[in-house]
Structure formats: structure tokens, C-alpha cells
Amino acid sequence: MNPIVMATLTSVGLTLKAVANLKKYDKKTEQANFARIEYQKILDEIRFYVRGEAFDEKVFLDRLKMIDNCITDHCMEIPLSVQRKYEKNTLNYRFSK
């Protein structure tokens, strides 16, 4: 292959890797995946309770609160532009009813 093409592809790859490392996308992805897995476990547990397993409300709510606190403490920050868009959409939805 042409050395110019190879150099261009290599430089683009190195640039993208540097940006990903700078933004710490791996850590953010890991945090989002952790939250998804923990909430999926909670939904599975609720499904078992609905099917007839013994339910202890205090233990379940304490565990749920602990997981929520852990996820809230380690969650990603929501960008300001996304927060504004969300608030605008919820405000429009409330007044449309």
C-alpha cells in the first residue's frame, strides 16, 4: 500500500485513541453498565416476588436504597445541554395535557 495512506490511517487511529483516553470513555461506559446490571437485578427480584417468593419489604427497600446511593455517588454527570433539553421537553409535556 501507499505509505501516505498508511500514515494517515495510523495518525487518525492514534488521535481517536488519545481523545478516548482523555475523555475516559471506558470508565463512563463501565459506570453505566454497572447501573444497568444492578437495576436489572432489582427488576428480576421484583419478578420473583410477584411469582410468589417470600417478600420482606424492609430488607428489599434497604437494599434498593443502598444500590441507589451507590449508583448516584458514582454516576456520570449529565451534560448541561441534555438537562436543558429534558427540562424543556417535560415542561412542554406538562402543559400539553
Image (cartoon, rainbow, N blue to C red):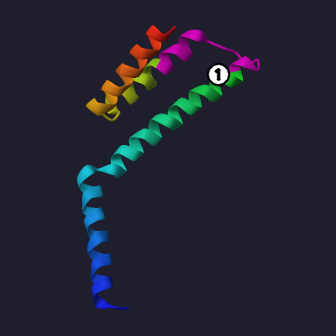
Q: Position of residue 24 (x, y in %)?
A: 29, 50
Q: Residue at x 41, y 21 (%)?
A: 89
* Nearest to the observer: residue 11 or residue 49: 11
Estimate how packed mark 1 is, as few (under 14), some (14 to 19) or many (20 or more) residues with alpha carbons within 10 Å: some
Instruction: Work out which residue is located at the far front of the displayed protein and give it.
Output: 96
User: Which quarter of the rendering shows the N terminus?
Assistant: bottom left
**Amino acid type for the residue under numbered disc 1:** Ile
- Judged left or right of residue 45, residue 66 is left
Does 81 sit above or below residue 46? below
Count of all numbered marks drawn on residues in the image: 1
Q: Position of residue 62 (x, y in %)?
A: 48, 15
* Nearest to the observer: residue 59 or residue 74: 74
**What residue is disc 1 on?**
46
Instruction: Work out which residue is located at the far right of the displayed protein and give it.
Output: 52
Range drawn in magenta: 49-64
Which SS class for mark 1? Answer: helix
Residue 53 in sight from this viewpoint:
no
Examine the structure image and report whether residue 56 is included in the region drawn in magenta.
Answer: yes
Location of residue 74 by image quarter:
top left
Does 82 sit above or below residue 96? below
Q: Position of residue 56 (x, y in %)?
A: 62, 12
Q: Residue at x 27, y 69 (%)?
A: 14
Does 58 sit above or below residue 83? above
Does 43 sit above or below residue 13? above
What secondary structure is the magenta-colored segment mainly? helix
Q: Residue at x 29, y 34 (%)?
A: 79
Residue 64 in sight from this viewpoint:
yes
Q: Position of residue 71 (x, y in %)?
A: 40, 29
Location of residue 48 by image quarter:
top right
Examine the structure image and report whether residue 66 is included in the region drawn in magenta.
Answer: no
Q: Residue at x 35, y 27 (%)?
A: 85
